[in-house]
Image (tube, rainbow, N blue to C red):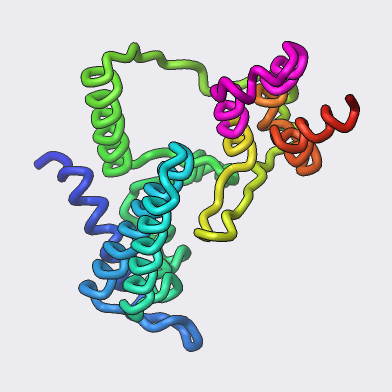
């Protein structure tokens, strides 16, 4: 009869895992919630995320103080609405063990080399998993190749150790995060640093006060942002670098 649509199969498997997880939740775990509460929580959570992104964009675009204040006020209202749903993230937490068991039982994934004892961390895609992957790749291809006119490439899955060593993944595989104390949003420190340097170098008044060596220094920090330690990220901010340059004459 052929394979069922991957999306329908995935939804069925996920629903089964969720039903099992909430129906037999051990003592002390958060109680199960009905579907309507789940959707209400998810909708409110998505609205908060969108509004937080809008506040960030307004700040980045140097919008007026009144416009930013209005957006922040709306964000606070959405967060209050999210809290009023009475559903916490813990109540919607999926039982990972039940979900993993379901994925294996339904053959979405199968441990690689299982008949030889298996290898930790390696899995093969079963029939529904393969169909789901094909659907995801096709959606990706429709957007990026057909709509965005990009060129598709397929590269090797293997990466030499020398490449990972040079990129810093061997010695340090941690993305530093920073938190906005006003909105509570978290960002990758290196990306925030890159954006701050972009804003600085795009400001005609600021860049006219910098020497060519200082401009090149900012660009060098921007290129190396992902490999900087915590102290290096602090020292790499345009404000700190400007203060040090001024202090040093």
Q: Nearer the viewer, residue 12 or 217?
A: 217
Nearer to the camera, 137 or 211? 211
Q: Quadrant of the C terminus?
A: top right
In the displayed structure, 229 sits above or below 160; it is: below
Residue 60 position, x and y percent, is 48, 39
Relative to residue 111, is residue 152 drawn left or right?
Answer: left
Q: Is residue 200 left or right of residue 107?
A: right
The quadrant the N terminus occupies is top left
Residue drawn at x 42%, y 57% is: 69
Name the residue rendered at 38%, 63% in the picture: 73
Would you say the magenta stretch is mainly helix, strand or loop?
helix
Image x and y of residue 206, in percent:
63, 25
Asked if the magenta segment contains residue 143, the reply would be no
The residue lying furthest to the left in this view is 1
Q: How many marks?
A: 0
Span of residues in magenta: 195-220
In percent of the image, x 68 and y 42: which residue is there? Answer: 174
Determine if residue 15 is in view: yes
Q: Quadrant of residue 244?
A: top right
Which residue is depicted at the point 41% across and 75% down? 88
Residue 217 is one of the magenta-drawn residues: yes
State which quadrant residue 131 falls in.
top left
Image position, residue 115 (x, y; %): 50, 44
């Amino acid at each position: 009869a052929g394979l069922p649509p991957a999306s329908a199969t995935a939804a069925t498997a996920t629903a089964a895992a969720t039903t099992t997880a909430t129906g037999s939740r051990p003592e002390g775990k958060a109680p199960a919630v009905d579907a309507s509460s789940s959707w209400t929580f998810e909708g409110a959570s998505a609205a908060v995320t969108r509004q937080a992104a809008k506040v960030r964009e307004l700040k980045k675009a140097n919008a007026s103080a009144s416009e930013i204040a209005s957006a922040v006020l709306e964000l606070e209202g959405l967060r209050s609405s999210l809290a009023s749903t009475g559903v916490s993230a813990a109540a919607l937490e999926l039982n990972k063990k039940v979900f993993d068991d379901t994925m294996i039982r339904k053959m979405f994934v199968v441990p690689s080399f299982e008949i030889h004892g298996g290898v930790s961390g390696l899995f093969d895609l079963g029939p529904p998993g393969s169909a789901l992957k094909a659907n995801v790749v096709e959606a990706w291809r429709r957007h990026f190749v057909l709509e965005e006119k990009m060129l598709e490439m397929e590269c090797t899955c293997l990466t030499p150790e020398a490449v990972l060593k040079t990129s810093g993944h061997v010695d340090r595989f941690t993305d530093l995060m920073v938190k906005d104390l006003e909105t509570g949003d978290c960002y990758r420190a290196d990306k925030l640093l890159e954006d701050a340097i972009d804003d600085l170098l795009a400001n005609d008044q600021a860049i006219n006060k910098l020497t060519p060596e200082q401009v090149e220094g900012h660009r060098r920090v921007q290129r190396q942002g992902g490999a900087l330690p915590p102290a290096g990220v602090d020292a790499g901010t345009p404000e700190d670098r400007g203060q040090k340059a001024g202090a040093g004459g």
